[in-house]
Image (cartoon, helix red, strand yellow):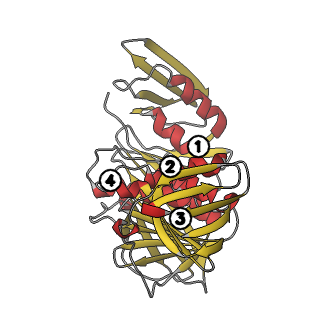
Amino acid sequence: MKFIINKFQIVNVLAKVQGLTGRRSNLAITENILIRSVPEGIHLTATDLETGFEGFYPASVEKEGAVAVSAKKLYEILREFPSEDILINEVENRWIEIGNETVQYHIVGMNPDDFPETPHITEVDFFPIDASVFEKMIERSTIISSAGDEKRAHINGVFIERMHGENSHRLRFVSTDGSRLNTVDHEYRLPATIPSGEGVLVPKKGLNEVAKFLDVEGEVQVGIKDSNFIVKKEKETIIIRMLEGEFPKYEDILNKGEDHHIQLDKVKFGKMLKRMSILATDNYKGAVFTFDNNKLMVTATNPDYGESKEETEIDFSGNPIEAAFNPKFFLDTLSVVDDDHVIINIVDSSRPCIIEGDSDRTFISVIMPMRI
């Protein structure tokens, strides 16, 4: 294998796959990236055994071949390389020569035959989605993360549904951690079509890897085939192995009460919650939200540090409501709302609080009350 490539063709790609190659697995070779040179250019493949990446990039190829090389070291070398054109040449015993006339690296490679095979998927019924919309959907759903030792599939994954109506079709992402739930919708106006099928569970960490490759403009193709979720661009494809399990029924939790719809300035509300979170620790995360007589008062108490209290004017009348919530959950939600104002729907102290943008209703966040 021997070729010359412009560093800017692949250095950004190598940066983006570090999340895959840097993840621990049972196979040491997954820390490598597989390089295959063909007459037209090079194929790059990376995997963590759950999410696989494949990309093709133009290069001046003198000799075809394949090698697996440390993704981290290759990225660091190319990132700091002083010139744009770089020679990559496989010499004896899978050693790789990287350099030009003045700079030379020799690094050891691994047997490409030991690299895990990526699924060969054909006849996928793809449907398009704007890359920027898709990225926003991923951001809004994966902001609800899961603990590293979490075993429940519906916590580790995002539930993806294709919903069909008379005048439009809808793609929906749903995520939860048991204490909150987010739904994100994208509507396809007819005659656009998306394939029907049951909802699927796609790992959050795989979707986060997809988001790194999404552009501000243009479309990507999305497909679901067998046990794989596929995202395809012109030169790059990411294949995620889906999770097995069922997502809990969630529709009833989205029902809003008729009593209280409170509009709040997003920035001012966020700053208030940040101030009320200063005393929070892992053992004392909650704060008491009191809605009464056109005011919202938030009180936080931590026996190790003290207490804090702040109130703001709102449009609220009726019986007082006092409920405990984790302010961090509200802050997470506010960080992905694009509107200047948010609408809070709350019924009583035992039922969840529902948050959405003042005008953008494609995103709904549901936060459960705490016991403190």
Question: Measured from the top left, where is residue 238 in percent x and y?
Answer: 49, 68
Residue, disc 3:
185
How many C-alpha atoms fall within 10 Å of the one at disc 4: few (<14), some, or many (≥20)? some
Q: Quadrant of residue 301?
A: top left
**Dot in front, 3 or 4:** 4
Disc with the residue nearer the chain's start (4 vs 1): 4
Distance from Cα at disc 3 to Cα at disc 1: 17 Å
Amino acid bearing label 4: Ser
Q: Which mark is residue 72?
A: 2
**Residue displayed at 48% across by 70% down:** 66
**Dot in front, 3 or 2:** 2
Distance from Cα at disc 2 to Cα at disc 1: 31 Å
Numbered disc 3: secondary structure: strand
Depth check: 79 or 272 in front? 79
Depth check: 363 or 136 in front? 136
Numbered disc 1: secondary structure: helix
Question: Measured from the top left, where is residue 370 in percent x and y?
Answer: 34, 35
Disc with the residue nearer the chain's start (3 vs 1): 3
How many C-alpha atoms fall within 10 Å of the one at disc 1: few (<14), some, or many (≥20)? few
Can you say whether 41 is above or below 14 in the image?
below
Amino acid bearing label 2: Lys
Distance from Cα at disc 4 to Cα at disc 2: 15 Å
Residue, disc 4:
25
**Dot in front, 4 or 2:** 2
Disc with the residue nearer the chain's start (3 vs 4): 4
Distance from Cα at disc 3 to Cα at disc 4: 34 Å
Residue, disc 1:
335
Q: Is residue 254 visible?
A: no
